[in-house]
Image (spheres, helix red, strand yellow):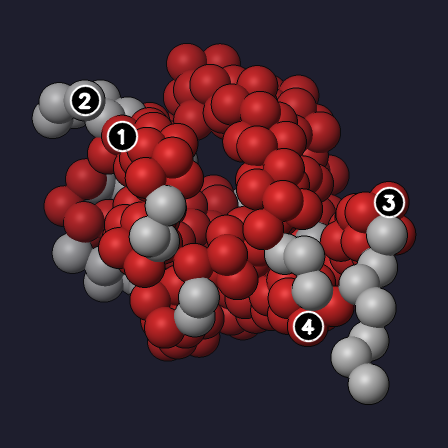
Amino acid sequence: MPVEPLPESAFIDALRGLSGRYWGTHPFHRRLHAGELDERALRVWAANRWYYQCVLPQKDAAIISNCPLPEIRRQWLDRIVYHDGVSAGTGGIERWLRLCTAVGLSRDEVLDERHVAPGVRFAVDAYVTFARTKPWWEAVASGLTEMFAGHLMQQRVADMLAHYAWISPEDLAYFTNRIDKVSGEGKDTLDIVVRHCVTREQQDRAIAALSFKCDVLWSMLDAIERAAA
C-alpha cells in the first residue's frame, strides 16, 4: 500500500532537522570564526570556495532547463542574475572575487582554478550533476541549505572583522549583500518544495536531496582543511 504523505508541518520539521549537518558546525568553519586561520589557510578557503560560487549559476540553469513550469522558471531566473550580475563586474561572483583579492590572491590565480583541491572539485561537480540529472523539484530541495545560511553569514562578518584585521567591511560585501537575500530565497525555496512534493516518495526524496547537499558542503570543507594543513 502507498505510504501516506507527511503532514506539512512534519515535512518541514524533517527538512529543518538537518540543520545540524550544515557546514557551519564543521571544525574548519569553527576555526575560521575563532580567528585561528593564518593567511595561507584563508587563501586556500577563498580560492576553493570560489569554485563552488562560480558554478552556482550553472546549477540554477540546470534546474530551469528541467522545469516545465513557467512560473517556477521565472522565479528561479533571479538566482542566476544575482550571481552572474546584470553586467560584467557585478553580481555575487564578482563580490567573492573581491574577498579573494583581500586575502592575498590574484584575480588570475583564482580564475584559472590552480588552487582548487580535487576533493572540492569532485564534490561541487557532483552537485551540478545532481541538478542536471534529477527532477527539478528534487534539485530545488537540495538548495534548502539556504534556510540555515543567514545567521551563519551574519556571524561570519562579525567574526572575520574582529579577527582578521587586513579584511575590511567592503571586502565582505558578498556576505553582507547575501544575508537578507538568502533568507528570502530560503523561504521561497521551502514554499516551492512544500507545494510540489506532495507524495511520501517525493517528500522522502526531497529530504534525501537536502541531506546530499549537506554532504557536498561538508566534503568541501574536509578537502579544504586537508589542503590548508
Q: Nearer the viewer, mark 3 or mark 2?
A: 3
* Residue that badge 1 annotates: 81
Please give the label number shown on residue 86.
2
198 and 83: which is toward the camera: 198
Q: Mark 1, residues whose alpha carbon is within 10 Å: few (<14), some, or many (≥20)?
A: some
* Residue that badge 3 annotates: 9
| Residue at the spot 35% in from the left edge and 53% down from the top edge | 67
Q: Mark 4, residues whose alpha carbon is within 10 Å: few (<14), some, or many (≥20)?
A: some
Label 4, secondary structure: give it. helix
Above or below, 37 against 125 in this view is above
Three-letter residue code for mark 4: Glu
| Residue at the spot 67% in from the left edge and 57% down from the top edge | 198
Q: Earlier in the sequence, mark 3 or mark 2?
A: 3
* Residue that badge 4 annotates: 201
Distance in Å between CA atoms under marks 3 and 1: 32 Å
Residue 93, horizontal then vertical, whole percent: 30, 35
Distance in Å between CA atoms under marks 4 and 3: 17 Å
Given the current orientation, which residue lies at the most extreme bottom position?
1
